[in-house]
Image (spheres, rainbow, N blue to C red):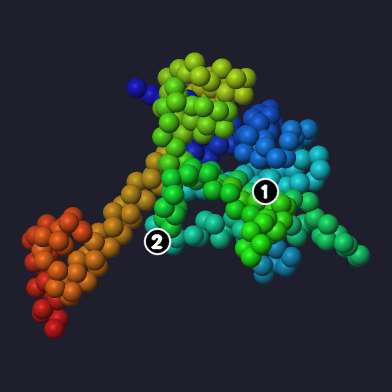
Amino acid sequence: MPDKYINPFTDFGFKKIFGEEANKDLLQDFIQTLLPEKGRLITLNYLKTEQLGRAETERKAIFDLYCENEKGEKFIVELQRAEQEYFKGGCHQQRSIYYSTFAIQEQAKKGKWDYNWQGVYTIAIMDFTFTQTQHKNVKTEVVLYDEENKVVFSHKLKYIYLEMNKFTKAAEELVNYYEKWLFVLKNLHLLNEIPKELQEAAFQKVFNIAEIAKYKPKERQDYEDSLKHYRDMENSLEVQYNAGAKDTKKEIALNAIKEGLSDELIIKLTGLEIEQIEKLRNEGEEKE
C-alpha cells in the first residue's frame, strides 16, 4: 500500500514542512518547542542558506534551513544523515560547530565593534544515533560550560541534537507537546490517519500539507525522486555498516584468539560461527 504522507527525512519532505514561506509558522512552532527559554518568536525570517568564507580559498557552508527572529538571533535547522557516522564518529557534531561560526562571523561590523553578537542556535534532526554516547535520551543539548564552577559560560551558543532512532513512544504514550513533534517527525510517513492525540493546529497543518494525493504531478515526481535518493542512501549505508561490523567482529576474534580465549567465549563475544573462528586461527598460524 503506497504511503499516504511524505517522509520528513527526505529533502523534499523536510523542506515542504519547514522550508516554505507558507509553512513558516510550523518551523517557528518547532523551534519554540525546543527552545522554550527564548519565549514566543514574534517573527521568523528565512535567510540565505549558502554561507561563503571570508576568502575564495576558504570553505563554505550550506545550511538546510537558516533563519533569524526579531532580535537578530540566528537559528540553523539541519537534517543530518549517517553517511559517515559508523566510520567517523563525531563528524556531524564537528560540522555543526563549524557551521555555527558562519552565523557568528556574519554579525561582525566593519570599523569599531563591541563584539555584542546575537545568539546562534543549531538544531540537528538526526536519522541515526551517536556511536559514542550511551544514554537513552533523544535530545542532547550542548552549551559553553564553565567546568570548574559548574555554570553555563554563555547562553548565546547552543546545539540541540535529536537522535530520532531513540524515540519509540506510541501515540497513546505521548505526554507533552515536545513528544508530539518527535512522534510526527518519526512516524508521519507510516501513518494512514491522524491520531486522536494530535489535534493541535500545527499538527493538523502538517498532515494536510504532507498528503501526497494532493500534490500536482510535478510535485509528486519531485517527492518520488527525493524518496528514491533517501532509500538508495539507506541501502548503501546498510551495506557499509554490515561490512564495518563484519570487520570489527573479525578484529575482536583475532585478538581473542591471540589471548588464548576459548572458542565458546569467542562465539559469545562476536557471534561468529565456529568454522569462521577456526579459519581465522589457521590464517594466523600460517602468518606466523
Quadrant of the image containing the N terminus: top left
Q: Earlier in the sequence, mark 2 or mark 1?
A: 2
Q: Position of residue 104 (x, y in %)?
A: 74, 57
Q: Give 163 or 99, whichever is nearer the viewer.
A: 163
Q: Is residue 51 left or right of residue 252?
A: right
Residue 220 seen from this side: no
Residue placed at 37% from the left, 51% from the top?
Answer: 237
Picture layout, residue 203 above or below residue 98: above
Residue at image mark 1: 121
Dot 1, crowdedness within 10 Å: few (<14), some or many (≥20)?
A: many
Give, as a three-letter code, the residue at label 2: Phe
Residue placed at 56% from the left, 60% from the top?
Answer: 94
Residue placed at 81% from the left, 39% from the top?
Answer: 70
Q: Position of residue 97 (x, y in %)?
A: 61, 58
Q: Nearer the viewer, mark 2 or mark 1?
A: 1
Q: Is residue 254 left or right of residue 190?
A: left
